Amino acid sequence: MKISCYAAPAKGAPLEPFEYESRELGPGDVEVRITHSGICHSDIHLIDNDWGISKYPLVPGHEIVGVVTRTGPEVRRLKVGDRAGIGWQSGSCRKCEMCATANENLCDHSTATCVNGFGGYATSIIMHSHFAIRIPDALASENAAPLLCGGITVYTPLRAFDVRPEMRVGVIGIGGLGHIGIQFLRAYGCEVTAFSTSPDKETEAKSLGAHHFVPTSQPGALASVAGQYHFILSTVSADLPWPSYIAALRPKGRLCIVGVPNSDLKIPAFPLIGGQKSISGSPIGSPLMIREMLDFAARNGIKAKTESMPMHRVNEALAHVRANKARYRMVLTN
Ligand code: NAP
Ligand code: ZN
Ligand code: ZN
């Protein structure tokens, strides 16, 4: 079957209409007719080959929601007509210790939807059903699509690093990931601070659940909150003044990085040693964790705030994200 989509023909190039012949439907596969496809900043990193892993033509898109149109004979969890969501991960070895313990996102042989195949800026996609997750009825497709990568990426660290209701927490960067992170942390019961370079986001960050807002481009803003936080999540796709954020942690506090900075981190050792502080990273989440996250979102009224555009306006939508103008996630629609 031919699938119509949009592809970057070369590094950094505008996307163009493209067609490819999809693989045959395997016994465990589902075919999904895509209705919504979020634009994650990782799509932009891939288009620009920032990580040196891109192959062209490159079809971005890994925050996919659509309707199941065909299922292979071994598929149990989804049926034709169900809404399904697909995120960053398209495969794993399904044999190693990580896969056997529902940590497929940590598998060494993990494959990615739009790196090892063609992604979601397309009319449809064939995917192994293990990595296609049913969308709860309470979530609208447009608000659910960004949860498939942005949402799970900010949810997983809360579970992995035991974030608890009594904690004071921060989210750096109020973009696609960050605005969902605020909502999860608020629903967890934490005292939430938004760190942002965009002062105009204050009102909305607070309406999403932030108790406090720190405008980080103001001189002295970060120094004024030194020693306060149990947990800070960075969702920023740029280099930050990391030592100031380490200083913002309380003793035993943790800085968790999910946004991908341009350069390696340069961090002084003594504040880490003296305050017994930690730095961590975290990638996406397992299919089991995605299911849990979607249920948690549905139960707590958590949804991505979106702006949508028809898929053919993809280059305009990408420019909007590159300019940090999206409020807060662009979603392409078919
Ligand atoms: P996004 O929607 O573009 O949001 C990023 C936010 O970071 C911006 O809204 C902005 O927030 C802040 N920011 C941007 N440039 C900045 C700069 N130069 N200095 C300081 N702050 C800046 O991006 P996203 O889709 O949320 O993705 C964020 C990052 O997470 C990307 O690097 C992406 O690749 C990565 N990511 C990682 C995973 C994972 O598995 N770990 C999964 C998905 C995405 P303010 O305006 O509030 O400052
Ligand atoms: Zn594995
Ligand atoms: Zn993503």
Image (cartoon, rainbow, N blue to C red):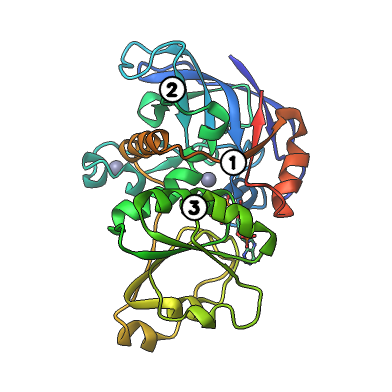
Q: Which of the image's four quarters has the N terminus?
A: top right
- Element at label 1: loop
Distance between mark 1 and mark 2 Cα atoms:
18 Å
- Give the SS element for disc 2: loop
Type of residue at label 3? Answer: Gly
Residue carrying label 3: 209
Q: In the displayed structure, does residue 289 sit left or right of residue 96?
A: right
Q: Is mark 3 in CB contact (under 8 Å) with mark 1? A: no
From the top left corner, tell me how far across and down residue 31 is, in percent.
48, 18
Query: Upstream in the sequence, badge 3 or badge 2?
Result: 2
- Amino acid residing under circle 2: Asp
Residue 305 circle label: 1
Q: Nearer the viewer, residue 293 or 2?
A: 293
Rendered location of residue 127, percent (x, y): 45, 26
User: Label 1 is placed on what type of residue?
Assistant: Lys
Is the C-beta separation of discs 1 and 2 under 8 Å?
A: no
Q: Secondary structure at mark 3?
A: loop
- Where on the picture, by quarter, is residue 6? top right
* Residue receiving disc 2: 137
Image point 62% across, 60% down: which residue?
A: 202
Camera-near label (3 vs 1) is 3
Whether residue 123 is visible, yes or no, is: yes
The percent position of residue 176, horizontal first and vertical second, equals 57, 48
Is the residue at mark 1 in contact range of ligand 1, meaning its CB lies under 8 Å from it? Answer: no
Q: Is residue 283 left or right of residue 307?
A: left
